Amino acid sequence: MDKSIFTALNSMQILKNNQSVTSQNLSNTNVPGFKKDIHANFGSIYLDREKGIDPRVYALSDVGAFDNSQGTLNPTERPLDLSIDGDGFFIVNPKNGNQALSRRGDLKIDENRILIDNTGAQILSVDLEPIEVPPFQKISIAKDGIITIQPLNAEPGEEINVGQIGTTRGTENVKLVKSLDGYIRTEQGGIPEPDQLSNIVSGFLESSNVKSVDQLVAGIEQSRAFEINVKFITTAKELDEAGASLMRMPN
């Protein structure tokens, strides 16, 4: 069998993975703060004939990353809807998993008075602890993440601080990647230290940065590329059979 078939199969595997990424992006178009997964980039490698190996070219895929560009900030007039304007992430504790970073800001208070997002992930404080919010008449969240409430039965103008939402921009020396659970962490599986440099905007929700049309076009291109590789394998098979037939011809 012609070894070029393995080159085509390698490319098809990458295309299959990219199709999964496209589907993932499209399914999260309406998820607040979702960051688009980036398709694997095609590269190539030449095998060295001097080492006794045929010099064939193989497609290589880079480790998938995510697009950290900001989505649109949409007004909701709800004080517990938060967005980060510019760089940065909220620090969260998912229901299942280790501490992570997130841009999702559709917050609420659970039955235990703990601040969570709509997936159930706890929003952590600058001390990396869950934030407990007592019953209140009014709540406000400042751009530095400080939460202020007017308690029930409080005198007019009486306010108390109940915590500060932890945020981080990360560092230039730390690469952030998406984990299998969809949350963002460092390559080692941890999170950067809180630095409170992010600008929080209350009453706005950040939309997903996925552009549906771009993803649909990418899906069509991936399907066509997959078909080309299938045709390539068919052609290689026909050439291989023709060569074998010639070898069987009598002298």
Image: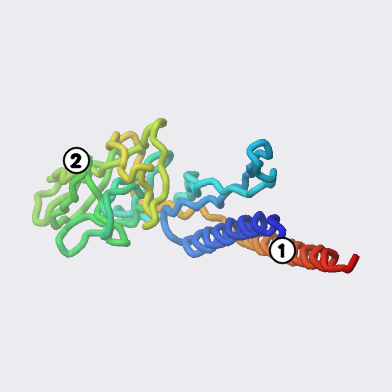
Q: Which badge, 2 or 1, comes first in the chain's sequence?
A: 2
Q: Is residue 87 left or right of residue 127?
A: right
Image coordinates of residue 131 in percent, x first then y, are 18, 50
Toward which corner of the image does residue 214 lie, by quadrant? bottom right
Q: Is residue 36 left or right of residue 245?
A: left
Q: Residues within 10 Å of mark 1 (few under 14, many from 20)?
A: some
Toward which corner of the image does residue 127 lie, by quadrant? top left
Q: Is residue 2 left or right of residue 129?
A: right
Helix, strand, or loop for circle 1?
helix
What's the CA distance linking mark 2 and mark 1?
57 Å
Against 122, is 196 above or below?
above
Residue with the mark numbered 1? 233
Image coordinates of residue 191 in percent, x first then y, are 31, 42
Q: Amino acid at mark 1?
A: Ile
User: What residue appears at the point 14 percent right and 44 percent down from the top-left corner?
Assistant: 160
User: What residue appears at the point 29 percent right and 38 percent down from the top-left corner?
Assistant: 144
Q: Amino acid at mark 2?
A: Asp
User: What residue appears at the point 35 percent right and 53 percent down from the top-left corner?
Assistant: 105
Against 154, is 188 above or below?
above
Image coordinates of residue 91 in percent, x first then y, are 29, 46
- The quadrant of the image that shows the N terminus is bottom right
Q: Is residue 74 left or right of residue 201?
A: right
- The quadrant of the image that shows the C terminus is bottom right
Dots 2, 1 in contact, CB < 8 A:
no
Of residues 145 and 55, the one nearer the viewer is 55
Residue with the mark numbered 2? 127
